[in-house]
Image: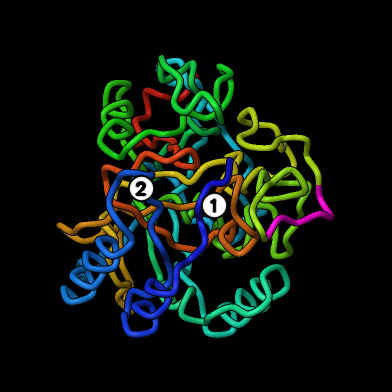
Amino acid sequence: MRVRRAVGAKILAAAVVLVLAGCAAAVEPGGESTEDVVAVTEEAAAEGPTEEPETTEGIPLGFEPVAHNADWAPITEVINGVEMALVPAGCFMMGSTEEEIDDALELCEAYLGDCDRALFEGEAPQHEVCFEAPFWIDVTEVTNEAFGSVGCEEFSSEPDQPRNCVNWTDASAHCEARGARLPTEAEWEYAARGPDGLAFPWGNTFDGTLANYCDANCENDWADATADDGFPTTAPVGSYLGSASWVGALDMSGNVWEWMADWFGAYSSGRQVNPQGPGSGDLRVLRGGSWPDDPKNLRGAYRFMDLPVGAAADLGFRCARDFDPADMTP
């Protein structure tokens, strides 16, 4: 069975016009139409960029800002039964420069042929984001076992596979029930890319052995026949140990798209501290790419979105949690 993830002509046409261009939403058969998604995207564009929060100085809790990915050794703790990675306080450049968008376009064309630069315009402008305090993020995506039920059995039925076919509301509720929350878009990108702003969690060059994407097992037209990981759909979480991000988080590229806490909106250009995204909207942000996607979608800066009711076979999530010194093992 194919999962439709291609960007339709109407989406591309809208993307060229919109400041928010860059993504098409996944819609389950029988759900909202592509036209509906375009309409709500246009409304989001009309709202303009989010208000920039006031900047502050200082990093509390005794954690010094991290200047380089290599300056941080991963720290993990089991919190409420789930292994989480500590993301230190610090700053990074969120989004993409024009040169990085050039690189993304080149990657896209290498795998798909003709690509539209508008696919990546939502990653600009690049801007500095800082976190005043550390936070936690799940080492892996939430599994069927942890969620307590199976999503789309045809695609993900084993206990250690990511819980898919989950909408934003149910994902958020699961996180809250275990004393956590969905990560913000900025938190997720910082945990994936770090102060060095890597293109992928493992580095700046795509490696098909380090992520579950549309390889030789995939039925989509853009399948990459040069790679074969043996997984036709979702893979058990943590299957690609070499893909760990600088904080030790796994599967941040591929497997399933991950719901973010944020509404989708345009980036502002100024420095932001602990950004939370727009106060309202129609589409929720998704990050990380998934098993039926090509490599461009697996980049740490790539932005995607869907209606909160979306629950497709390639949509999942992981949780985040505010830092509490009591979480640390003595």
Magenta-colored stretch includes residue 145: no
Q: Where is residue 43? Give x, y as percent.
A: 18, 70
Disc 1: CA contacts within 10 A as few (<14), some (14-19) or many (>=20): many
Q: Is residue 66 above or below residue 258?
A: below
Q: Where is residue 153? Give x, y as percent.
A: 51, 23
Q: In which quarter of the image is the N terminus?
A: top right
Q: Which amino acid does label 1 sit on?
A: Gly
Q: Which amino acid does label 2 sit on?
A: Met
Q: Where is residue 75? Give x, y as percent.
A: 57, 34
Q: Is residue 233 above or below residue 294?
A: above
Marks 1, 2: nearer the viewer: 1
Q: Where is residue 265? Give x, y as percent.
A: 27, 66
Residue marked by disc 1: 289
Depth check: give the residue in front, 292 or 56: 292
Q: Give the magenta part as a residue range.
A: 222-227
Quadrant of the rendered structure where residue 172 is?
Answer: top left
Residue marked by disc 2: 260
